[in-house]
Image (cartoon, rainbow, N blue to C red):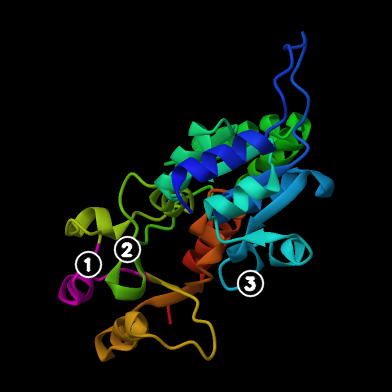
């Protein structure tokens, strides 16, 4: 659909301008989220009647932590035409949401909140609070942050285990130093081996480097049954099997640390628990 047609349609659908009222802005009544991480926060923090649509990804339990909550919520594929037709008064997008869609929505006058990618737990807390306030429920944000902190306090070891962790994901991708994933590993009392051995510019670790790193804990994505892929072939290499036998291996569902939500505390807990297990 040409941009000029979308713009004209949006102008017809948007409510007429009214003088700004004093006092706090009213809570949005029709919210649309445009990426999975926005979906998860919106579905956890908004009233159900506020949610006009989430993305189709929210319903997939392989990657979503809110699949059950999303089951009866309308969904989109993030196309401009779909968003305009829903007449949202707030659109929540992510840093990697299609830039053309976001730019067009802004251009025609929709209110768009863009979420960045937190690099630490303070960033996670700030993002939760930002979304909760935008939805008109700041108290829910504080409740979620308190629950996150309580879970972290229970999970974080009082004494580091002295062991080292290496994350190996499909296609040899790892957790980069300075990222939220790195903060999660360190919160569990585990130095991130990727920071020691270096990575290429794509954030990948060669199999040879992984083998020589001699990590105490190998962290893999938990495989979904019946979904083999070429990207996972490296994880089944005999060298990886040998690494698993030499040290310890823990599998964690990717959905738990794909997005910067309260679920990241569960990853810290699982890693800390794995680090405490006796070596075989």
Q: Of marks 1 and 2, which one's residue comes earlier in the chain? A: 2
Q: Position of residue 57 (x, y in %)?
A: 58, 65
Q: How many residues crowd mark 3 within 10 Å: few (<14), some (14–19), many (20+)?
A: few
Is 280 drawn above or below residue 97 in the view shown? Answer: below
Is 211 within the magenta? yes
Q: Say which residue label 3 marks.
A: 61
Residue 237 seen by the camera? yes
Residue tagged 2: 174
| Magenta segment includes 47 | no
Tag 1–tag 2 contact (CB < 8 Å): yes
Q: At x 68% / y 33%, what residue is drawn?
A: 14
Closer to the chain start, of discs 3 and 1, is 3
Nearer the observer: mark 2 or 3; the answer is: 3
Question: Which region shows up in magenta?
Answer: 204-217
Residue nearest the viewer, comparing 208 with 81: 81
Q: Residues within 10 Å of mark 2 (few under 14, many from 20)?
A: many
Q: Pointer 1: what residue?
A: 205
């Amino acid at each position: 659909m040409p941009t000029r047609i979308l713009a004209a349609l949006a102008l017809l659908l948007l409510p007429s301008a009214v003088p700004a009222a004093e006092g706090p802005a009213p809570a949005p009544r029709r919210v649309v989220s445009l990426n999975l991480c926005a979906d998860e926060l919106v579905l956890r923090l908004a009233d159900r009647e506020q949610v006009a649509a989430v993305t189709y990804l929210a319903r997939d339990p392989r990657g979503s932590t809110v699949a059950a909550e999303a089951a009866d919520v309308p969904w989109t594929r993030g196309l401009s035409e779909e968003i305009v037709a829903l007449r949202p008064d707030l659109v929540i997008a992510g840093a990697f949401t299609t830039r053309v869609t976001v730019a067009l929505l802004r251009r025609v006058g929709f209110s768009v909140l863009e979420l960045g990618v937190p690099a630490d737990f303070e960033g996670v807390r700030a993002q939760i609070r930002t979304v909760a306030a935008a939805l008109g429920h700041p108290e829910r944000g504080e409740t979620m942050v308190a629950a996150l902190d309580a879970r972290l306090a229970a999970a974080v070891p009082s004494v580091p285990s002295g062991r080292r962790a290496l994350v190996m994901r499909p296609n040899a991708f790892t957790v980069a130093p300075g990222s939220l994933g790195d903060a999660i590993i360190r919160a569990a009392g585990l130095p991130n081996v990727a920071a020691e051995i270096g990575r290429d510019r794509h954030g990948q670790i060669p199999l040879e480097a992984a083998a020589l790193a001699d990590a105490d804990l190998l962290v893999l994505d938990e495989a979904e049954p019946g979904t083999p892929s070429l990207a996972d072939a490296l994880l089944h290499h005999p060298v990886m099997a040998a690494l698993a036998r030499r040290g310890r291996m823990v599998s964690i569902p990717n959905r738990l640390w794909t997005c910067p939500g309260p679920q990241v505390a569960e990853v810290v807990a699982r890693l800390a628990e794995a680090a405490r297990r006796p070596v075989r």
